C-alpha cells in the first residue's frame, strides 16, 4: 500500500484530525492482516527432547571379573602402570592385596569413569 502524505489543509468532508483517524484505522487493519499472515506462516516449535543419561557408549567394565590386575586397570583409565600402582598405594584407586599381589576392585572404578567424575 503506498504511503500517503498528510494533507496540509482540510480536504473536502473533514478536518486534518479526521484524516489522521482514518489513516490510523487503515494502519490497524494492515497490522491485523500482517499479524494474521505471520500467524499462518509460523512453524510449530519443537519440544525439547530429553537425552538419556547413558549416552557415553558401552560400559567398559561389563564382563570384567570383580578384581583386575593393576596393569589392566591402568589401561582402562589411561594411566601408566607406575601411576596406577602409586595411586593404589595412596588409596586413590580401590585396591586389595591378595597373596602378595595388588588388585583393583572393578566396581570401585565405576565412579571414576562417570562423566562428572563424582565418587
Image (cartoon, helix red, strand yellow):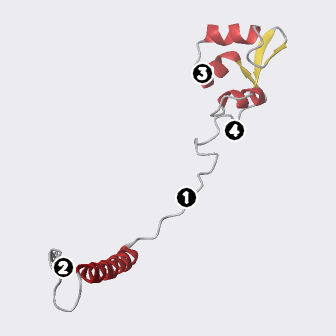
User: Which of disc 3 and disc 2 is earlier in sequence?
Assistant: 2
Marks 3/1 in contact by CB < 8 Å: the verdict is no
Under circle 4, the secondary element is loop
**Relative depth, front residue between 78 and 98:** 78
User: Which of disc 4 and disc 1 is earlier in sequence?
Assistant: 1
Q: Residues within 10 Å of mark 1 (few under 14, many from 20)?
A: few
Q: Which residue is mark 3?
A: 75
Tell me the CA gap for discs 2 and 3.
Answer: 73 Å
- Which mark is in front, 2 or 4? 2
**x 61%, y 23%: residue:** 77
Tell me the CA gap for discs 2 and 1.
Answer: 41 Å
User: Which of disc 4 and disc 3 is earlier in sequence?
Assistant: 4
Tell me the CA gap for discs 3 and 1.
Answer: 38 Å
In this view, 51 is above or below 27: above
In this view, 61 is above or below 92: below
Q: Which residue is mark 2?
A: 1
User: Which of disc 1 and disc 3 is earlier in sequence?
Assistant: 1
* Residue 48 badge: 1
Q: Residues within 10 Å of mark 3 (few under 14, many from 20)?
A: few
Q: Which residue is mark 4?
A: 62
- Which mark is in front, 2 or 3? 2
- Which mark is in front, 3 or 1? 1
In this view, 32 is above or below 76: below
Tell me the CA gap for discs 1 and 4.
Answer: 32 Å
> What x and y, as percent, mark residue 109?
72, 27
Marks 1/4 in contact by CB < 8 Å: the verdict is no
Under circle 1, the secondary element is loop
Under circle 2, the secondary element is loop
Tell me the CA gap for discs 2 and 4.
Answer: 71 Å
**x 76%, y 17%: residue:** 103
**Relative depth, front residue between 43 and 2:** 2
Amino acid at each position: 500500500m503506498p504511503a500517503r502524505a498528510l494533507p496540509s489543509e482540510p480536504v473536502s468532508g473533514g478536518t486534518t484530525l479526521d484524516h489522521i483517524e482514518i489513516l490510523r484505522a487503515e494502519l490497524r487493519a494492515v497490522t491485523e492482516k500482517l499479524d494474521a499472515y505471520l500467524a499462518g506462516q509460523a512453524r510449530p516449535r519443537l519440544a525439547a527432547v530429553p537425552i538419556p543419561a547413558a549416552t557415553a557408549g558401552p560400559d567398559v567394565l561389563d564382563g570384567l571379573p570383580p578384581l583386575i590386575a593393576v596393569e589392566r586397570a591402568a589401561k582402562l583409565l589411561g594411566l601408566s602402570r607406575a601411576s596406577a600402582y602409586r595411586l593404589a598405594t595412596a588409596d586413590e584407586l580401590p585396591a586389595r592385596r591378595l597373596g602378595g599381589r595388588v588388585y583393583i576392585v572393578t566396581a570401585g572404578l565405576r565412579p571414576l569413569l562417570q562423566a562428572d567424575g563424582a565418587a
